[in-house]
Amino acid sequence: MALLEVKNLEVSFGLRSGAVKALRDINFTLERGERIGVVGESGAGKSVLGFSILNLISQPGRITGGDVRFEGKSLQNLEDKDMRTIRGNRIAMIFQDPMMTLNPVLTIGDQMVECLLAHREISKSAARKIALQKLMQVQIPSPEKRLDQYPHELSGGMRQRIVIAIGLLMDPDLIIADEPTTALDVTIQAEIMELMLELCERNNVALILITHDLGVVSQVTQRTMVMYAGRVIEQGPTKEIINDAQHPYTQGLINALPQMGVRGERLQQIRGSMPTLQAIPKGCAFSNRCDYATERCRVIPEFTRSGGCLVACHMVEEMVAQSENKAQEGGA
Ligand code: SF4
């Protein structure tokens, strides 16, 4: 049985102008210990997906279709107290800004102990011992001293390590990390991602890594889902997506990545911007930014299999044939 199964998930927001769909037709499974990246620009629906897995969509949003199953059990109709047991205990969420998680007026130790006592029947001193162990796991220098410090006394990188330690307190089976390194310097970003990878591998924890950064996804995850305007438009093994993306949007994201060793060339941008939920084009949502759009694209594309990936684009078969022809010509 899969650890997590998301089936036909749909989330809508009730606005004055009418209901708009923020997520449509999201389908994926995640096995124990597996790491999946969710990529796309701002407004693609990545964070809404993270929150909806934990049933944390706030008004005017709500889940209007589909199901999220954790170890086979639907999370949609759970009583609040059962859902609270799953959140934090079995599934932890890590946010971009550590200050969203940390309470500025409590010491790190008090926050960690409080969190443990809310979920487990243990003594305060046992909780403090566990907190210390977790700080050691995330390789915080002088962990004992950190327990008695306040968040403002620590650097951004250290605060994010503490948030990861808090996420690990209950030994979760799944971590949902929403842009966990975006607020940090590049060198610290790399250290934090390495740490997350090591901790997930060592503890067999599954990871949903939500990010706009395909570079980060390629370092950490085995599978990738690319989202656009509330839908998944390409998904498959991360290596295949990075090396041979089929969807024009994914290709655009990859072409926009800075290349090591290439100097003096302008980065290629995807023209235009992500449509708002009220202005998603009919048919393929990417059509007003796509260089390959034709009449056919007025109809929403179904998924086509290409290698190990599923790609929602009418042109995918032609594009695969073209690249095969090119490869043959090159080999002739
Ligand atoms: Fe472009 Fe059409 Fe493919 Fe959409 S379906 S990505 S508009 S070619």
Image: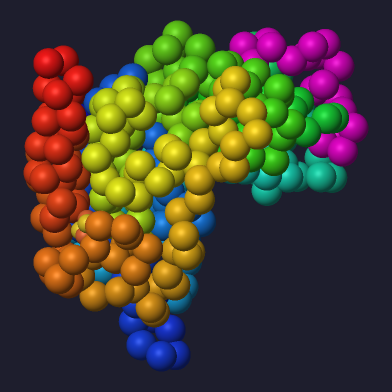
Compared to residue 170, the image places residue 67 above or below, namely: below
**In the picture provided, is 251 more to the left or to the right than 117?**
left
Membership of 247 in magenta stretch? no
Residue at 58%, 16% (x, y): give it.
Answer: 195
Q: Position of residue 218 (x, y in %)?
A: 43, 25
Q: Is residue 179 above or below residue 324?
A: below
207 with respect to 144 (left or right): left
- Residue 309: percent from the left, percent from the top? 18, 34
Instruction: Identify the residue shown where x is 17% and y is 42%.
Output: 319
- Can I make out residue 141 in this image? yes
Quadrant of the image occupied by residue 289: bottom left
Residue 172 lies, with reference to residue 322, above or below; the image says above
User: Looking at the image, which is closer to me, 185 or 263?
Assistant: 263
* Residue 129 picture location, percent across and down: 68, 13
Q: Quadrant of the C terminus?
A: top left
Task: Point out the stretch of residues depicted in magenta.
Answer: 136-153
Residue shown at the point (38%, 78%) measured from the top left: 279
Question: Is the N terminus in the top left, top right, bottom left or bottom right quadrant?
Answer: top left
The spot of residue 154 in percent (x, y) is: 85, 30
